Image: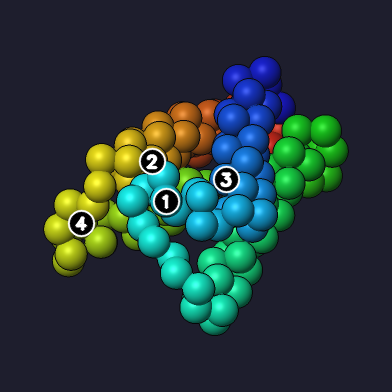
Amino acid sequence: MSFFQKACLFVAGLTAIGIGAIILVVPHAFYASYDIALGNDVSLLSDVRAQAANLAVLGAIMFAGIVRPAWSRLSVAAALTVFLAFPLGRFVGIATDGLPSAAILTAFGIEIAIAVLCLVAFRPGRANTALAG
């Protein structure tokens, strides 16, 4: 993989692990920064933490592809899945529910930026070992 491709996986992995870990450990504080009150519904908190753990693990898979060539295809797939799915979900939310808070729109912008970086780095036809195979 090229330096640019590794850098894209690093940014994607760090973002996914960081956000996933923060939500997993302190979900109330994280969502409060988006002006969302989670409350004390144990089922909701369980679901939020489960999704956060999923995001953190996918971030770890992204990192694995940087250091283990055998994991590169999986790490690219994880990065593209996460950072295309999040903006897609937010776009559907905006289209159906209206505009969310400024903090969520900022997250939306960051997710799109990471998605674009990954799409450029791993576009079809680009010579790279991550997608060879």
Quarter of the image for residue 8 reads top right
- Say which amino acid is labelled 2: Ala
Q: Tell me the distance, in whole angstroms, between the alpha carbons under discs 3 and 1.
A: 14 Å
Label located before the other in sequence (4 or 2): 4
The reply, left or right, for residue 28 in relation to residue 102 is right
The residue singled out by tag 3 in the image is 19
The residue singled out by tag 2 in the image is 107
Identify the secondary structure beneath mark 3. helix
Q: From the viewer's perspective, is the residue at label 3 or at label 4 nearer?
A: 3
The 10 Å Cα crowd at callout 1, few under 14, some 14 to 19, many 20 or more, is: few
Q: Are marks 4 and 2 in contact (CB under 8 Å)?
A: no
- Say which amino acid is labelled 1: Ala
Residue at image point 78% right, 42% down = 64
Label located before the other in sequence (3 or 1): 3
Nearest the viewer among 24 and 123 is 24
Label located before the other in sequence (2 or 1): 1
Label located before the other in sequence (4 or 1): 1
- Say which amino acid is labelled 3: Ile
Identify the secondary structure beneath mark 1. helix
Residue at image point 25% right, 47% down = 101
Per the rendering, the mark at residue 32 is: 1
Q: Are marks 2 and 1 in contact (CB under 8 Å)?
A: no
The residue singled out by tag 4 in the image is 94
Q: Is residue 131 above or below residue 54?
A: above
Q: Are marks 2 and 3 in contact (CB under 8 Å)?
A: no
Q: From the viewer's perspective, is the residue at label 4 or at label 1 nearer?
A: 1
